[in-house]
């Protein structure tokens, strides 16, 4: 019930209330319901945080979801996007690669995301090395 209400709130534009609803559902989620249910709640709350422009919160919630359910595709994709937005390219590439390994229709996009992040990580390292080099 709380999950359905959270989904409705998230899609109708009241994302803050939806995130609060997912939080309430997590508190009420009994261990008997299994880790998959809690992982889905964390991943859904992460989507609310993404839409609210809070990538650090997205990473936190997706990481919690992935601890409970390591192959949760939505949590991997959402965390990869958030890490990329935070310019944590190596971590984003790892998540994209894990998502690609799961297969499915998102695998080609995940492959491209991993390649993009690996390139960005190399570019960032090159820029950092150039800044650290003594100027002649």
Image (cartoon, grey):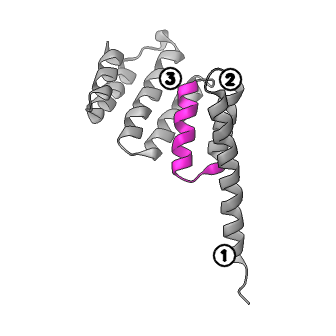
Q: Position of residue 101 (x, y in %)?
A: 71, 27
Element under label 1?
A: helix
Q: Point out the tag, 3 or 1, that comes first from the N-terminus.
A: 3
Give SS at disc 3: helix
**Is residue 18 shown left or right of residue 119?**
left
Q: Separation of disc 3 and disc 1 at Cα?
A: 41 Å
Instruction: Point out the stretch of residues depicted in magenta.
Output: 73-89
Which secondary structure class fits the magenta region best? helix
Q: Residue furthest top?
A: 32
For the residue carrying disc 3, how many other residues have a C-alpha within 10 Å: few (<14), some (14-19), or many (20+)?
Answer: many
Horizontal and vertical percent for residue 46?
44, 34
Q: Position of residue 65 (x, y in %)?
A: 53, 28
Label 1 packing within 10 angstroms: few (<14), some (14-19), many (20+): few
Magenta stretch: includes residue 126: no
On residue 8, the disc is: none
The local crowd at label 2, few if under 14, some if 14 to 19, many if 20 or more residues have their Cα within 10 Å, is: some
Q: Which residue is mark 1?
A: 131
Q: Which residue is mark 2?
A: 102
Q: Quadrant of the N terminus?
A: top left
Tell me the residue at 51%/13% (across/down). 34
Q: Does 25 sit left or right of 87 as displayed?
A: left
**Lower position in the chain sequence, tag 3 or tag 2:** 3
**Badge 2 or badge 1: first in the primary sequence:** 2
Q: In this rendering, is residue 106 above or below 130? A: above
Q: Which mark is residue 39?
A: 3
Q: Nearer the viewer, mark 3 or mark 2?
A: 2
């Amino acid at each position: 019930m709380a999950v359905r209400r959270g989904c409705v709130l998230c899609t109708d534009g009241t994302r803050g209330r939806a995130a609060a609803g997912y939080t309430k559902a997590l508190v009420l989620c009994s261990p008997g319901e299994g880790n998959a249910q809690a992982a889905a709640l964390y991943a859904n709350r992460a989507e609310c945080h993404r839409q609210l422009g809070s990538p650090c919160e997205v990473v936190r919630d997706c990481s919690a979801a992935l601890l409970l359910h390591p192959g949760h595709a939505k949590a991997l994709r959402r965390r990869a996007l958030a890490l990329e937005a935070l310019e944590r390219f190596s971590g984003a590439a790892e998540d994209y690669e894990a998502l690609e390994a799961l297969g499915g229709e998102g695998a080609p996009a995940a492959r491209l995301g991993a390649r993009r992040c690996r390139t960005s990580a190399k570019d960032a390292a090159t820029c950092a090395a150039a800044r650290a080099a003594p100027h002649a």
